[in-house]
Image (cartoon, helix red, strand yellow):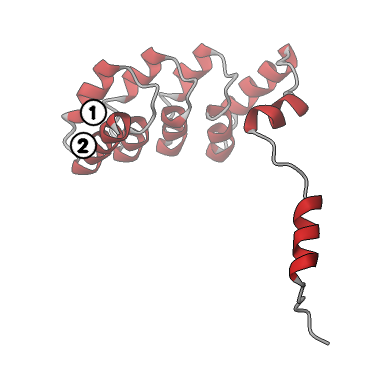
Amino acid sequence: MSCIRFNTPAQRAQMKAQAPAMLTAEEAAALHPAPPVTASKIARLRLLAEDPNPRIRERAALDYHLPEEVFEKLARDPDPEVRACVARNETTPCDVLRSLATDPSERVRGFLAVNFFVPSDAMEVLAADPSPVVRDLVRWKSELATA
C-alpha cells in the first residue's frame, strides 16, 4: 500500500476551507503571555551567571531579564562565547555594549556589529576595526538599515 495521498481538487478545496486561520505574531503572543519576572527568576539568573560551566553562563547572558551588574560581569567573562552572547543580547545596556567594541575576540566584535541596539559611537569603533570580517559586518548592517 502506498503512503502517497491523491486528493481530488474538491477534497483539496474542502481541506483549505477548513484550515485554521493564521495568527499574527502579536495575536499569538497575546494568547500565550509570558509569565511575570519574579525575584526568584532573577536569583536563578544570578546563579546561572556564576556557574563554572561556560555554556550555562552563555544561557544566562542571553536572557532579557538579566540585571545590569550581571551583564557587566559576564562582559568580562574569560570565555569569549559568553561575551559573544552578551554582545548578541538586545537588552544588554549600552555601556556594556560599548565596552565590548574593543574586545580581543573577533567573534565577540562580530556579534556586536550585527546587534541593532549598539550605540553609534561603538559602531564607529567597529567600523574601524582591524578585522575585515567585523568591518564587513558593520557595512552589511548599515546597508540593511538604509535598504
For image coordinates 53% across by 28% down, the residue present is 61
Q: In terms of secondary structure, where does tag 1 sit?
A: helix
Q: Nearer the viewer, residue 67 or 31?
A: 31
Q: Residue furthest bottom?
A: 1
Q: Callout 2: helix, strand or loop?
A: helix
**Residue at left 21%, top 37%?**
135
Q: Is residue 86 above or below residue 8?
A: above
The x, y position of residue 88, in whole percent, is 44, 31
Mark 1 / mark 2, whichever is N-terminal: 1
Task: Tell me if mark 2 has few (under 14), some (14-19) or many (20+) residues whose alpha carbon lies within 10 angstroms of its own.
Answer: many
Query: Looking at the picture, which amino acid does disc 2 mark?
Result: Arg
Quarter of the image for residue 16 reads bottom right
Q: Quadrant of residue 28?
A: top right
| Pick the front one: 119 or 95 | 119
- Camera sees residue 108: yes
Residue 30 located left or right of residue 136? right
- Which residue is situated farthest in the front direction here? 10
Residue 75 x %, y %: 42, 24
Task: Specify few, some or many for label 1: CA neighbours under 10 Å numbering under 14, 14-19, or 20 or more.
Answer: many
Q: Considering depth in this image, is 21 or 54 the residue closer to the camera?
A: 21
Q: Where is mark 1, residue-wise? A: 126
Kindly indicate whether the residue at mark 2 contacts the one at mark 1 (C-beta within 8 angstroms).
Answer: yes
Amino acid bearing label 1: Leu
Marks 1 and 2, Cα distance to the nearest angstrom?
A: 7 Å
Q: State whether residue 14 is above or below residue 73.
A: below
Numbered tag placed on residue 135 in the rendering: 2
Q: Residue at x 33, y 24 (%)?
A: 100
